Image (cartoon, rainbow, N blue to C red):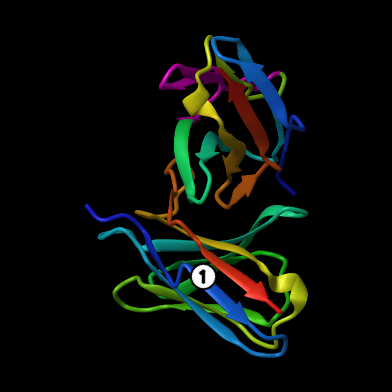
């Protein structure tokens, strides 16, 4: 069945460092891809999405490009802030949502 | 527009009991999905309801059931609770549940089984 594999955490970075969280997927069809973020004590919030190959989703300085040839949707940010500390989930929809295991990011001042 | 509301936020139940969790979706959303989140298993899909019908179901035992009402509000029931059912239960709504649409999540109900 469809599945998502994302980079194991936790990830600890200093403020203003470059962030990459790897995500690859397995799907029989053509899923939509998402990154969700979960702050402590909260539900998940959509960070960005891409619905077809070569689409780039972006929001709040985060970006991810739907790469069909490598079945990947890696999350990147050029300069992280302390407020970006959270758990990040890669997900696909085909049409059920399937989530990766989540990657905990801690950004230190 | 009000977000997805889940009640209660916290629950403590005893093994063997049953529990009902409630989810009110965003107004106008007809699809409601339920997920179980645990440290060991991560986020796992339970089921999805659309227009009062269960449209998709994850791989959970029959102790887990749900329903959706005509106003799109949904309830999830777990019977004969086990210690392993302790988790954060998340509800998500979307307008139609189609592939390209995002899901909007509630804050979850944290269930502790003792």
Is residue A56 one of those drawn in magenta? yes
State the extent of the magenta-drawn residues as a range.
Answer: A49-69
Q: Tell me where residue A16 appears, x and y as whole percent.
A: 54, 9
What residue is at 75 percent from the left and 49 percent from the top?
Answer: A1
Which residue occupies the foreground of this view, B27 or B12? B12
Q: Quadrant of the C terminus of chain A?
A: top right
Residue visible at 74% across and 32% down in the picture: A9
Give x and y (percent) for residue B73: 36, 72
The front one of B15 and B66 is B15
Q: Residues within 10 Å of mark 1 (few under 14, many from 20)?
A: few
Q: Quadrant of residue A27?
A: top right
Q: Residue at x 56, y 35 (%)?
A: A86
In reply to whether residue B13 is colored magenta, the answer given is no
Report whether residue A36 is seen. Answer: yes
Tag 1, which chain? B
Using residue A33 as the reference point, say whether residue B29 is left or right of it.
Answer: left
Q: Is residue B10 left or right of residue B3?
A: right
């Amino acid at each position: 069945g469809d599945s998502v594999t994302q980079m194991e955490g936790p990830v600890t970075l200093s403020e203003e460092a470059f962030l990459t969280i790897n995500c690859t997927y397995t799907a029989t069809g053509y899923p939509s891809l998402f990154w969700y973020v979960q702050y402590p004590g909260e539900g998940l919030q959509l960070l960005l999405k891409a619905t077809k190959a070569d689409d780039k989703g972006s929001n709040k300085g985060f970006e991810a490009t739907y790469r069909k040839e490598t079945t990947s949707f890696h999350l990147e940010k050029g300069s992280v802030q302390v407020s970006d500390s959270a758990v990040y989930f890669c997900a696909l929809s085909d049409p059920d949502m399937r989530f990766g295991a989540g990657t905990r990011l801690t950004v230190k001042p | 527009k009000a977000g997805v509301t889940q009640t209660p936020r916290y629950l403590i139940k005893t093994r063997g009991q049953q529990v009902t969790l409630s989810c009110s979706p965003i107004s106008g959303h007809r699809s409601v999905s339920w997920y179980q989140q645990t440290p060991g298993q991560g986020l796992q899909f339970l089921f999805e309801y659309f227009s009062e019908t269960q449209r998709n179901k994850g791989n959970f035992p029959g102790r887990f059931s749900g329903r959706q009402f005509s106003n799109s509000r949904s309830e999830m029931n777990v019977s004969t609770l086990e210690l392993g059912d302790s988790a954060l239960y998340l509800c998500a709504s979307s307008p139609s549940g189609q592939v390209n649409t995002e899901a909007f999540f509630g804050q979850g109900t944290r269930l502790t089984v003792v």
